[in-house]
Amino acid sequence: MQFAFGFLLLLGYLTVLVSLHELGHLLLAKKFGFKIEEYFIGFGPKLWSRKRGEIEYGVKAIPGGGYVKIAGMNPYEEVAEVDLPRAYGSKPIWQRALVIFCGPGVHFVVAVLIFASWVFFFGDPALPPQPVVASVEQTLNGSPSPARLAGLQPGDRIVAVGDLTNPTAQQLSVYVTDHAGQPVAYRIERQGVTRTITMTPIAVRNGNGVIVKGRIGIFLGPTYPGVVKSMTQGGWWLWYSVDASVHSVTHVFGPSGVGRLYDSLVHGTPRDPNGGASVVGVGQQTGALVSQGAWGTLLELLGFITVFIGLVNLIPLPPFDGGHLALLVIEKVRGKAMDYRRVIPVAAVVVGFLVIFVLATAVLDIVQPLPGP
């Protein structure tokens, strides 16, 4: 039930995101006077459509994508002579580039709004938080968390950890990580009474066994900025997520990521926690967050997913939008039109790789799920 709800929630969000992505292409193409024939969400058999003006709008049976059909973009279709001035290849390169970029560009706008909403309603972990316990996790790695065992409660104020007095969240994180697996003394203030407790942080390791974080199972109360500051911080989180997603894209689709995926699928080796996940795996994560009531973390996750998909769309290979942009750059350098039929085999190879990759990660998400969020 948890997975089903998470999967449907994620699928609904991705459908909205795809609709906005394609709407970005559509609106700018209309602005520049391109001949637009179709705007569809989904692929395969047509479920519903309606024609308004010269554009047919509709929904198809297979979710997970969508498209805007502009006359002249398909190199195997003839364009009516009357439509040639409005065909894709007849428009200036800069207009074609903006129309193509506007699709993935929508992702970054949506991500800023998601991150800004997250910051506004749930606080910004990048800002110095109050040193007050907001919540206590009951378990870590399947066992009672150190914070639960020590009896920490929401509202407890951390006045010292080790030799640090009134530490910030960043100082706490660094100190606890440096002392993962070692007893650490905390001074806690509760209702005006201060006491000292000792907890041993649990080490969180990456796929190579290296400690990346120490945790005791608490979340500190965040700082809640206003609307303007939330939008500013939303832009900051966009920049941060773009940087993180660039590294993630190169890792997931690079030799090490694909090799680790193959080893996990064929030899059963442990999965890379920073590796790829299909909609099945992300649906599992989404369902877990909903069941925990972690709506803030869910918003954060959706923001990162939005940026990640936007960057994948900018990979400079057909049939991605980035592939179309790369062809326009080549066309500009050469000074003459490209024969797009020559890149169809490249697009077929890329699509084939993606299908295999998605199926492989979906199988792993079922038989060897990633750890919970």
Image: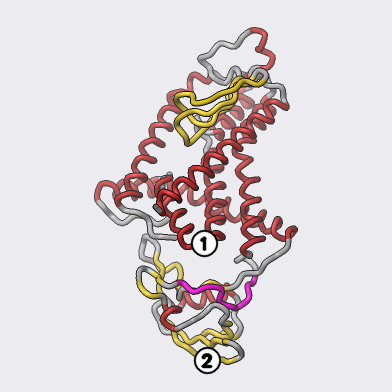
Q: Which residues are magenta?
A: 128-137
Q: Is residue 111 visible?
A: yes
Q: Residue at x 49, y 81 (%)?
A: 152
The nearer-to-camera label among 2 and 1 is 1
**SS label for mark 2:** strand
Provide the residue designation for mark 2. Answer: 195
Residue 341 colored in magenta in the image: no
- Crowding around mark 1 (Cα neighbors within 10 Å: few <14, some 14 to 19, many 20+) is few
> In the image, what residue type sits under mark 2?
Arg
Say left or right for 206 vs 244: left
Provide the residue designation for mark 1. Answer: 294
The overriding secondary structure of the stretch rendered in magenta is loop
Q: How is the image coloured?
A: secondary structure
Closest to the observer, 179 or 71: 71
Q: Residue at x 64, y 26 (%)?
A: 332
Q: Residue at x 56, y 23 (%)?
A: 49
Q: Position of residue 28 (x, y in %)?
A: 69, 30
Task: Answer with the quarter of the image where residue 236 lies.
Answer: bottom right
- Crowding around mark 2 (Cα neighbors within 10 Å: few <14, some 14 to 19, many 20+) is few
Task: Answer with the quarter of the image where residue 220 lies.
Answer: bottom right
Say left or right for 70 vs 291: right
Closest to the observer, 63 or 108: 63
Closest to the observer, 288 or 360: 288
Q: Is residue 314 visible?
A: no
